[in-house]
Amino acid sequence: TAAGTKRRHDDITTSASSVTPIDCTADLLKFVDRVLELVVELKVAHGEDDDDDGDDESGVKRRRLCGVLDSFVFVGNGSSSTERPSSSPLTLEGALAALRSNGGGECGWSSSQSFDTAGNEGDGDDHQSRERLIRSDLNALGRLLRHELLPSSSLGSKDDDGGWVTSLRDLGFPLSISLLILKLLDADSAPPDGCIFGATALGHYRTAQQVEQDLLFLRTHSDRFLVFGASDAIKLSEAGSRGCYSCIVSPSSKGVLCGRDAELEQLQGAFRRSVAMPSSHREVVFISGYSGVGKTALAEQLCSYAEALRGNVIKAKFDELGQVQPVSVLLDAFNEHCRTIVEGDKTAMERIRLRLRTLMGSKNVEILAGAMPNLRELMGTPSRPSTPDDHSLEEEVDAKTTSNRFMWFFRLFVRGISNPLYPIVLLLDDMHSSDKAVLNLVCALSSDPDISSLLVVACYRNTEIGPDRLLQDATRDFASAGISVLRIELKNLDKTCVNSLVSHVLQMSPASTKSLSDIIHVKTGGNALFVNQILKSLKDEGLLKHSRSEHRWEWNVNAIESRDVDDNCLDLLKLHKLDPQMQAFLNKASCLGSGGHVSFLTTGDQGMSTILLLETAVNEGLMSKVGSDCFKFSHGQIASLVYSRIPPGEREALHVSLGKDIWKHASVEEVEALVYVIVEQLSHGTGLITDRDERADVAKMFLMAGSKAVKTSSFTAAERLYLQGSTLLSETDWTNHNYELSLRLFTSCAEAQVMTGNYDGSIITLNAVLVNACLIDQMRAYSILVQCLGLQGKHVEAVETGLQALAMLGEKIPLHPTEEEMMLTLKQTRAMLVGVQMKETVDSKAMTDAGQSAALNLLMRLSRYAYLVSDQKLLTIISCRMVKLSVEHGVTSCSAFGFAAFGANLHRFDGLSAGLHYAKIALALLARFEKEAMIPRCTMVLAEMLAFKEPAQARLRSLLMAIEIGFRAGDNEASLTCLNVFLLHSLQSGGIRLDTLLDHLNKFMQHMTLAKHHSLVVANLIRQCIYNFQGTADDSNIDPTDLSQSPSPPAAREGKKRPLVIQYRECVLRLQLACFFRCYDVAKTVMKKCDDLHEAVKMLTKSAQCAEQTFCAGIVSAAIAGDALVLGRDAEGETYSSRAKEAVRRYEELCQHGPHFRHRLAALQAEINFHIDKDFSKASVLYDESIRLAGEHNYVHEQALVCELAGIFHKKELIDYEKACSYFEDAKKYYTEWGSKRKAQEMDKWIAD
């Protein structure tokens, strides 16, 4: 025996021990190949070959068979045919000689004469004689193979005691070889009457073709059936002096998948796509099917495939029984992956650590570490204990901001661990038990363009997808985010696949197990889980048993057919037969769901006995161990069945007892980690908790769990937790020491309800606060109410509610202020600030009054809704009131926003210098309080004013920085508004190539889509505008000013009217397109609409959009006026001539503050001298001056526009085609540099003309 490759038992016989066995597993394949060659020739000799033309004589066939048999050399004995004596029974002639001499012979192989003679006999006995001869040949082949593997066995022996099978198994030969020989040896036996235990239950071979089919099957599945020295697929346990096979291991647990080749190829294709296109391809796979159909087994095969290709697999299994917060399941999976990285390759770990520190920053680890504590070790950051200050700061941040911040950093974390060289497969099992928060998180990860090589695979039961059809809604969200969805629906297995499954479990060939698998298929319907359970049940009942002497499975077909099986085959587990202690243990375990932790069940005095029960449950196949101290039920359906057997009246008490037990034995740190488990158990029986103090303590636990859920964006779970906690309190708790607890529970609950869209429920909850809380504490409730109304699009009602709350604090502001009221407030604020130095304001005392601080925060929130209703007068008064509060009562970080807004409004009335003064104060306050979260808010309100001081290109970098800071701080509202400004300024300044700008837009589009932010509307308009400039293959019939092809946001599809500000921006974009493409008829209509909107939106009087409108309208008006005057339409010409000259006047004012506007002024003057004044020499000079100035400030798109206008001027008026062509060539160069292919093609037409 080759060292290290075989195992022997002490009781192997002397003769068997003298055999030189096959050397290795690979030689088994050679062995099977040689036997297969022999069987093929035997099939030909028997006339079974389909290709046989019938011309070959039997004698020729037999001689060919003799030649094959003569050259048949087994690896085991190692001797060639030339070394064997002529009388060796291992040749056909030797076997025939022995047969003749022994009168029946050792081998018993039929002679050629007798076989030939049989072919000439009459029809009556001919068929039976032929069958006998074939069976005799197959039996002889079996004895020949047995003798070759065990030469000590007798060829002539008909002994079927199975001793030789034991010898083969002891030498390491697989069971499949033994069964093959056994069925050959039984070939000459007549079929028995009825079905009894024994070899006949396996079925014997009747033709060489059947032998060939089995050999081909063994060859195809060699990794399962031809593994030398491998143990059975059946667990062997020794009980006393006799061995018995205790259970049949689930096929899926062994990595075997039957009948899922096409589905597996689809999954592997999705994985390959995620690797080949790590950033551009986004795909999510949904695997659906009934329970037990093999969804998880299929996904596990993909995981094995991915791991073989250096992929990382992150598995999260949701549980409908034992979880209160599904997102925690997902985060636990990522937390475990952090541990895997730390314990893996150190070089790879250091690379990931460096990347995470770069992306997240070490100080932000704690944002995620509460949910993923292993992240601290991965980042190399020590744990920072929480302090009272931390909790006070958390209370100042609303739930939405906390959620946004967590989502942002979690995405940064996944970006850090993802790598095209090590792709990630995120397996979400039992997705039907998840919630909206999980789906939102998955959508955010899948659509993030900076997360590379991530494939999400979600398994769910298609009959249990929730009442609100969350998964269907999710697929629509995925599609809108540009994510491909691959759907794979699994059906039950057919007869062939069930037979293959049974064949694997019993480690027998499919031909041997067909009689059993056909019955199982009928009784289970082809459900893989049920197949496994019924096999185990049949074994337990003795209807399927393993013969230790013959090493094979035997079954009673009649008894199995007559056996009744319940519709739910899991009832075969016979749970009622378990002893009471085991049943009690399983009941307790099922309360935790299908997965759990040993420590939950080993607390108290019964810890050791519980561990022993757990081991027994594992041995019984009810549970399986994961790691050293974790366990789970073998299948979720088993956990559900166990739980369903608990009497309903006992469930509540069992849950509460378990929750209290875990709580009692957990340390302070462990309570925070286990809070979800504890409250899930207590939530099932809160009615059993009657003591008032105990109910308050449990309510605190629900508050802790809800706050933890909010931090991970799980608002649905948080709402449920807060509601359950609030039901534990009574009205009297508002008046005793539980006041603070009541306030926090109800306020937090209302906030969570707003985030889930339960607006009516939020208002009901807030009413309890407004009735019972003191005035200062009511302010947070009013702030939540304002947010609730605003999210419903009720902006006017939101403003009205906020102003009512301010009036309660003594800050009365009219809902619809008049022009006189606005100017009076502005005058009073100016007077208050006279003589106040900037340093004095910045260094003034910090605000300490809680009421004034609440008023300041509420004013800041109201400013957004005042902007959306386009009430410039109200916006001005709000900014004045924020400045007044800051000067009189002290400053906070919110004061920075107040001074910034005040400066932006003052710019309209007192000029740019006055506005910039207060902008500097705002920036100084930001530096004092070091409040990064205020940077995007201040940038948002100052961006339009700063556009008049410096070129747009100089502001783009600061806008990008503000966007990044806002996302980090969780202020998505301010970030996305800054993003809106960034996109508009980038397009209208030409400082970024169109394709680069489109990349920026698509990158941030996901944030807008997920947030359903109003900036998505403008972003879609900008994207369509870019497409119009870039052009398509055929632009001849496409209106370049048409923006209607941009996707409609949900609000528009629901018939909601866009805010006036957004309508105005759309008009300005269309006017810009009309100006560049000289669509003057369209421009007339758009200019009229712009004027109407500008009149309605007074706050845009001095804005970058207003400046853009003025320039484009001036260029267009000069051309229209010139054409009208030529055609004799003097009135029209005069109207548009006045408009063009008004544009020049406005730009003369702008150039006093910003020299970057001078190229526009020169272009306007040139067009007026060309079209209206007809001063061609001056126009020529001004065109050149405008082109030069635009180049100095890098306004490449307007440099191209003026070159185009100059070319038209020289072509039409000066008839200088050579110079006109030169200008058109320059225009083409600049348009190409900007990325406008369509305009560059237009220049080619001008040049050709």
Image (cartoon, rainbow, N blue to C red):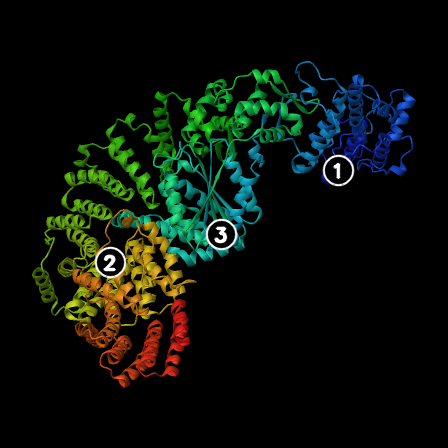
Disc 1 marks which amino acid? Asp
SS for dot 3: loop
How far is mark 2 from mark 1, CA to CA? Answer: 78 Å
Assess whether mark 3 and mark 2 are in contact (beta carbons under 8 angstroms): no
Assess whether mark 1 and mark 2 are in contact (beta carbons under 8 angstroms): no
Position of 1210 with respect to 14 (left or right) is left
SS for dot 1: helix
Residue at the location (57% across, 49% down)?
Answer: 309
How far is mark 2 from mark 3, CA to CA? Answer: 39 Å
Task: Answer yes or no: is residue 900 visible.
Answer: no
* Location of residue 833 with respect to 610 vertically, above or below: below
Residue at the location (70% across, 15% down)?
Answer: 192
* Location of residue 991 with respect to 560 vertically, above or below: below
Disc 2 marks which amino acid? Gln
Quadrant housing residue 1043 = bottom left
Q: Give the crowd class for mark 1: few <14, some 14-19, many >=20 residues within 10 Å.
A: some
**Quadrant of the frame with the N terminus:** top right
Q: Which residue is mark 1?
A: 33
Q: Which residue is mark 3?
A: 453
SS for dot 2: helix
